[in-house]
Image: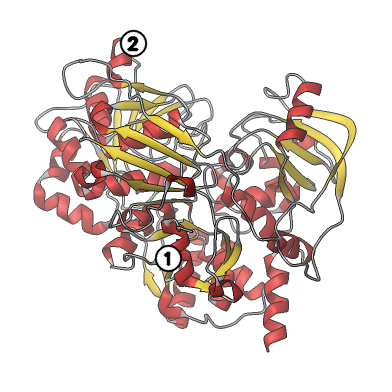
Amino acid sequence: MARTFVERVAARHVDGWEAKRGPREGDAVWLRPTRLMTHDNSSAVLARFLAMGARRVVQPDRCVVVLDHDIQNTSPENLEKYARIEAFARGQGLEFHAAGSGIGHQVMIERGHVGEGDLVVAADSHANMYGALGALGTAVSRSDAAGIWASGIFWWEIPASVRVILEGRLPAGSTGKDVALVLCALFPDDALGRAVEFAGPGRLQLAPDDRLTIANLSTEWGAVAGVFPSDDSVGTPGDDAYAATITLDLGEVGPHVSGPDTLARVEPVAAIEGDRIAVQKAYLVSCANGRLSDLEAAAAILRGARIAPGVELYVAAASASVERDAVRSGAWQALLDAGARPLPSGCGPCIGLGAGLLAPGETGISASNRNFKGRMGSPDARCYLASPAVVAASALAGYIRAPHARGEAKRPRPRIVRRTAAVDREPEAGRAGIARTPVAGRLVAFLRDGIDTDALCPARLVYKDDASRDELAQGLLSALDPEFSSRVRDGDVLVAGARFGSGSSREQAVHALLAAGVRAVVAESLAPTFRRNAWNNGLPAVEAPAIVASVRARFPGAERAPRFTDQRIEVDLSPLPAVARQLLAAGGLDGFLRARMQGSA
């Protein structure tokens, strides 16, 4: 039986019995990655590493640390944390990059840590970007990263794959960002929890930076990986190997804008220019679109001009190396002359940290990868996403517009074929130490689709290592319902809608649920990284569309606001894969690996 690209790469890195036959879709296996990247979260990873009983990183030459998220924070507490991370990294022999070096994913690529056929992981949701270079890149949690430091391996569910066949060539003015925004909006559920494999002659017409952007934003599409195999003969079996096949003519993709506050809504820029949607802030930042070609595209529009009065334009290169190249090319100075405000190479406003955040009532347009409500500032602001050229043109005009004369509003018409036949899976052998007892508690229904990790745990707590359980509990869903934390009880079971836990890979989203007393989560569908974070921390998280449909019928209005009921719900854990039940039985990954290491000592 033919194998997808992901199955083939996983087979090269599998650890244990699965290597005998090769992992297939649906298997939960232990893998040994080529590289692991951690960033500011390295201090939290270290705490988990020590909690597992580990003291030495087993494969330090495979581990890279890049400080990139909260680099504008010069408080004594943050500087002390950075010093502690650096001391650990250097003491263990890990490759270390100080604040200002750049965003970790860009640094990983520039340093040659990503190669064809590699398995490269990061404790950050945008590790998908590595797939642009023919690698399998995927996100892991902080606990996974600690486990890799301690044991060299992590567990992973082999996902189904979606094949995207790209035909034609992008028209002038269109970019990889537009391709990604279109796919996210037109097929919001097809990539969730799956790998996306880009194929077809059109992919060969894409510039390397466009591929990086598309792979990066496959995260926002809900994919666990977005890969560009270097050869069509690799990972291109018959269509029955794919959960879906999408065919997209690149020639139909014009400049687009997503939002506000969601990637599920996209419009051709030409269709909304006439609305003259005013912007107060514009951003040329992030690992999605902070490379030299992006800065030069914006500079070409702004050179010799000034941004509109009342608009603030912020620019940060994806790395210090990119910024040096932009200085040499003249693009950097052209942006500054136009009124752009420079920020250090790092994440910054993209994740709601540092200068330039959106204030209440403001509207922003960003070349970053995520525009969830409240992510880049106030939850009372609005945010749109677009390519660097559209961001620059909008900053120049003072409202959302394309960089060229208004033309036809092109609306792509992709074709999709979904797999109907079930995939055969071998039954898992029964094992000791597996959680089977149902979990029960009071039913709390909040059926809004797409509740993201920014809503579950606000950015202000993500890099506060000493955040208390009370702080985490109070932050839970506070942007959507300020009273949620005061009404939830210890032992409650949260029933949620589709794509629950999408967005950032922050593990504190699970910590906040646990701190508030949530005993289990039942959702129509779960974002894959959230699900693994939940299991790694001993929180049962189950996909049960039929249960959610029943709750939805019983509690109308729960899509808009949470419903705290007096009814009891019981959650059956037996459908979970064996690895999940083992983790839950051990109280999470810490306990599981601690027992494993003690058993092998």
Residue underneath mark 2 = 275
Q: x, y (%) of residue 451?
A: 61, 35
Amino acid at dot 1: Leu
**What percent of the width, then of the height, locates residue 516?**
76, 45
Q: Quadrant of the C terminus?
A: bottom right
Image side of residue 420 versus residue 594, left or right:
left
Q: Residue most toward the bottom?
A: 601
Of callouts 1 and 2, which one flags the residue occurring earlier in the amino acid sequence?
1
Residue for point 24% across, 36% down: 340
Q: Point out residue 386 in the picture as x, y percentages from the top left corner.
A: 33, 31
Q: Secondary structure at mark 1?
A: strand
Q: Nearer the viewer, residue 438 or 349?
A: 438
How many residues crowd around disc 2 within 10 Å: few (fewer than 14), some, or many (20 or more)?
A: few
- Above/below status of 487 relative to 422: above
Label 2 is placed on what type of residue?
Asp
In percent of width and height, residue 57 lies at 52, 80
Q: Residue at x 69, y 63 (%)?
A: 579
Q: Please tell me whether residue 83 is drawn above or below residue 130 in the rendered image.
A: below
Q: Which mark is residue 352?
A: none
Of 600 and 452, which appears nearest the observer? 600
Between the residue at mark 1 and the residue at mark 2, the CA separation in whole angstroms equals: 45 Å
* Tag shown at residue 119: 1
Residue 269 visible from this viewpoint: yes
